[in-house]
Image (cartoon, grey):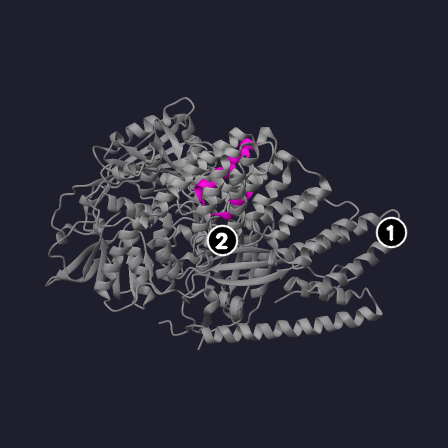
Amino acid sequence: MANRSGAAQRPNGQTQGKICQFKLVLLGESAVGKSSLVLRFVKGQFHEYQESTIGAAFLTQTICLDDTTVKFEIWDTAGQERYHSLAPMYYRGAQAAIVVYDITNQDTFGRAKTWVKELQRQASPNIVIALAGNKQDLANKRMVEYEEAQTYADENGLLFMETSAKTAMNVNDIFLAIAKKLPKNEQNAGQTGNNAQGRRLTEGDTGPKTAGNCCK
Amino acid sequence: MHGRLKVKTTEEQKAEKQKEQQKKLQLYRAGMKKILSTRASDLYDPESFGISTQLLCVNPDIYTLWNYRKEVLLIEKEESSKDEIEGDNKLAAFLDKEISLTEQCLIANPKSYGSWHHRYWVLMLHPNPNWDKEFGLCTKYLTYDDRNFHCWDYRRLLINKIGITLPAEIKFSTDCLNNNFSNYSSWHYRSTLRQLDENCIEDELNLVQSAVFTDPADSSAWFYFRWVLSNPALSKEKRQELLDNLEQLQELDPDCKWVVLAKCWLTGSLVLSDSEFVDKRVQFYKELIELDPTRKGQYEHYLKIAEEKLANN
Amino acid sequence: MDELPSEVDLLIIGTGFIESIISAAASRIGKSVLHLDPNDYYGNQWGSFNLQALLDYNPDPSEPCDFRNKSFSLKNFHYEWLMEDQKEDLLKNSRKFNIDLTPKLHYCRGDFVQLLITSNIARYSEFRSVTRILTWLNGQLELVPCSRSDVFASQKVSVVEKRVLMKLLTSLDDILDSENTHNFKKFLESRKLSDNLVTYVMAMAGATEHTSLGEGVKSVKRFLDSLGRFGKTPYLFSMYGSGEIAQAFCRLSAVFGGIYALNQQNLISLDSEDNRITSLTTTKQQIRAQNYVTSLEQCSEKFLRPVKINNYISRAILITNKSILPSEQEQLSFLIYPEGTERIINVFELGSLTGTCPKNYYLVHLTSKQVTTPQEDFKGALGNLFSGSDQPQIIFSCYFSIPETSDLDFENVPENLFLCPGPDNDLDYNSSIQKAREIFEKMYPDLEFLPRAPDPEEIIIGD
């Protein structure tokens, strides 16, 4: 997915620029295709009868934007939304969210609006929210009109696209749109983050700092 | 239930890594070939220039490419000098991008000679270089790794350029040491900052004694101690006091050769003002030979000189 | 809403720390897990609340039921506003608070951190280092030098004392464990440590004047062992509070198929026959499982003979307006406060960078073994730390007692029902993890406990 344009007139060439990392959470009813959307974006795959969980706490994918590399850490609900039991930790530090509904199922659109309200309540006030009307490939069974969703999105400051995890339509585009809207300042650059973030523990931090000198 | 989930084996992971390596190698070979061929005909070929950027980001130690870029930058400078109004700004913008490139490379490898040298070279070419920003960068990299000698050297270069605020540098040095006093570079840097006089020598002694008492096995602090001892501003009374302190330390750590060695250094300067210390010196060297037989030759040499002195008195 | 599954391998009631680890461990090895909680929040006595939720907290709802065992609920819960004028401002920022009922610190090389790393949960939970360790000596707060660097930089310790301290700390391996009959404090004094140094080492060990030599040495070694791994002190604190941790294990369970349902108001009873639990009955359905796990607090009295709780943990939570020891940068402080000869009060002072309170306020947690009541137990410390004109002021305070249940034994419990105790008075989760392992081993004797979960990059989807 690298986006390296050719050298233009007298440039210094394409420097790699900074890397920004963002946590993105998915929301929406079961069976709207949240996991399929992620799978399509991260692995370029689609499975008709995908199991609802895939054993990963999150998946990652990177996209290039001008001179910035944006890395998404994508969290799926792991089924905890089914009985309204998403933990507060799910929303922690999430800078972006995709609320998914199924265009062939009016109920899921109604629920999506509830999820948006939940985000406005639980998540950070600056979170970038995108509304995804999934299963566009089944447009002949459509129950939610494009304009209705678009209007709702506009009223609430959300990005909006109809997507299809099956055909891949607009899947990359919705993530790209989110990436463009996210603030790419110093705070998100790099994985070590700034002082305000906690640290993640890794096996790499083993052993105390040796007290010795190079030559003792 | 999760038959679809499979974890890659280490074999698969290894194979993937191999593939990636091969790809990198191919890109490198193709890139270098292209650059060197176009350089012959047109020094500043934009495509080649772009390729060199990519290759350096991956491996900043390809010195040839840094030099190639230097050639191009000189052309750019030549061109912009022709433009009286906007020339300087254009050059500055161009060089700023070059500086960002070195920064990218330093993030990947903070110990690349090429990146540091190129950065300094570019700043020297720059119509209005921001030396203070450089200073900040240097401090930042030293907090990541206080043993990065490239960075210490760079700091010294900068200090030569912009001059030094002594109190700030002393504080910086103290902070480095508070963080980790097992560091030759930090102590050495501190010794380059100023000549010690009666006013500050007390503080330095307190600092270095804190180090050697906290960990007498750490050699870097002892060398600084030795440097402080060589200062003529140190009074005889003070030296005697230090000797007493070392005796206390020796009681606690009888097996540490550095304590005895330091007592030898002290008596070395003390005998100059008071021959009474000669027999002590002889005794200390004898102890050293016991404690540190690997360096017996050296100690026997000093012992001989001291014994001769004793005989002559 | 959908019906819950009617048949699972493991049914768990309660989302406290121990239950949540068991849930994750069982899901991880492929068992089908249904994890319920009558509460509408995660964590139970290990959970965390925003400010408003803390004010609304009722540990002992009046109606007894099969899933609320009053013997084990929090006692003496009450709070007061000492500065009414600040109330409105704080309530406006209610959501910025994450107030733990049971805050913990984690040794950087302790069992808990190791578990996080080996299970790979560490990939999505965040921690902050405790930045300084304090103790109380001669009427004032003192910084405890933890590391070699601290000892070097300390202005309060003479050079000879520095050497004596370092020598002691590096020679602990030579002290024989068999000396459990000797007294730790007396031992330190016999090693010619000055009073300051004795206090510092006691703080490192969390020791009282009655701590044995063996125990004291073991604790100091544990302290030193965790130095330098993730920061300058041996301790970590979970970002957003310790309440996140039960949630993290629950998430791991969900990711491997565990089904979660909070706010279960319609549970009626666990049914049993021939000393085995046969099913859970709700107003809508019956659910059967092979094994059942429940927290003590949510276990019906019919399975537990009434027991007298002999020990409690005293707790206090304060919101203050400045640090007990102000400094340039915000600190995460751990104060070991000796109260008399018998007791240590563990004090955590958390600032906004921990994600547990808004800017310009501090959240202070006090924990100790209970002697009389929480308010009495902490009176001395609060007087010393918060009453002077220079000292921080307490805006809000909350007190409660947690029953100590980790050592209770119950007889005649149905053989497929496993009981999880509540929080203990340890600094870290060691014994709680041990308890979870024991229960897991009883249910699944030869299976691996929380093997490493794959990284996202390692996963292949599809056949």
Q: Quadrant of residue C22?
A: bottom left
Q: Position of residue A145 (x, y in %)?
A: 54, 61
Q: Which element is circle 1 on? A: helix
From this viewpoint, is residue A33 visible?
no
Q: Position of residue A159 (x, y in %)?
A: 57, 55
Residue shown at 33% from the left, 32% from the top: C195
In the picture, measured across the screen, residue B180 lies left or right of residue B6, that is right
A101 and C459: which one is in front?
C459
Residue shown at 39% from the left, 44% from the top: B253
In the picture, measured across the screen, residue C268 lies left or right of residue A188, that is left
From this viewpoint, is residue B251 visible?
yes
The residue to which callout 2 is attached is B296
B220 and A201: which one is in front?
B220
Q: Residues within 10 Å of mark 2 (few under 14, many from 20)?
A: some
* Vertical arrangement, residue A8 with respect to residue B25, above or below: above
Give me the chain letter of mark 2. B
Question: What's drawn in magenta, residue-wise?
Answer: B201-224
The mark found on residue B81 in the picture is 1
In the picture, measured across the screen, residue A52 lies left or right of residue C192, that is right
CA–CA distance between discs 2 and 1? 66 Å
Queried whether the magenta region covers residue B219, the answer comes back as yes
A137 and C158: which one is in front?
C158
The mark found on residue B140 in the picture is none
Q: Quadrant of residue C29?
A: bottom left
* Vertical arrangement, residue A162 with respect to residue C75, above or below: below
Q: Position of residue B110 (x, y in %)?
A: 61, 55
Type of amino acid at the residue the image marks with label 1: Ser
Queried whether the magenta region covers residue B83, the answer comes back as no
Type of amino acid at the residue the image marks with label 2: Lys
